[in-house]
Amino acid sequence: MKLPRQGRMRAAFVMLIAFVLQSIPLPTALDVVRPPLLVLAVVYWSLRAPGIGGIGSGFLAGLALDVYRGALFGQYALATTLVAYVGVRQHLLIRNQTPFQQGLFVFASLVAWEFVVWLIDGWTGQPTGNWSRWLPVLSGTVAWPLVAWLLERGDTHAQR
């Protein structure tokens, strides 16, 4: 099945905007609680349209984070691909759930993403940080309903 070009372009545009928003410098106090917008975009597209924003998109988004953050090459790619894989595998179950249940899935996905990054940091001798490294998991979970609503709203306008 050939995927619509417009859908692929929209997903790529959304992920590019999420990457740019994640890359904008913020004061330290705000940067600590910045939600992982690129990971939320990967989760959204993995649940909404797995053929468009699935595992490959998660891998490319993770590689972009690897390069941007100067991390061990493949660290964020592995974590983001894992999140995308789980989203693709569970998309039929999760996308029809209530917003609260979707929020629990997003929370678990963000915890898994941060845990993989934290684990690789520890294995490679990088500083693993303190408890504040887990704050983006909470802010991402809180931001999920707004992110999903904005992307859904944009998608319904695009289909008209």
Image: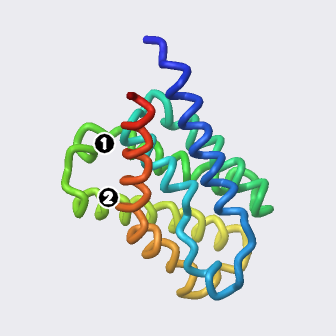
- Closest to the observer, 79 or 22: 22
Name the image quarter holding residue 10: top right
Q: Is residue 123 left or right of residue 25?
A: left
Q: Nearer the viewer, residue 74 or 59?
A: 59
Packing grade of label 2 (10 A; few <14, some 14-19, many >=20) is some
Judging by the rendered image, the residue that carries numbered circle 1 is 90
Nearer to the camera, 159 or 135: 159
Q: Name the residue located 23 percent from the left edge and 63 percent from the top edge.
A: 100
103, above or below 3, in the image: below
Q: Quadrant of the N terminus?
A: top left
User: For the residue labelled by badge 1, is the local secondary structure a helix, a strand or a loop?
Assistant: helix
Of residue 16 and residue 79, the one placed in the foreground of this image is 16
Q: Residue at x 69, y 56 (%)?
A: 20
- Identified by mark 1, the residue type is Gln
Residue at mark 2: 105
Q: Quadrant of the C terminus?
A: top left
Judged left or right of residue 2, residue 30 is right
* Residue at the (70%, 77%) spot, across then down: 26
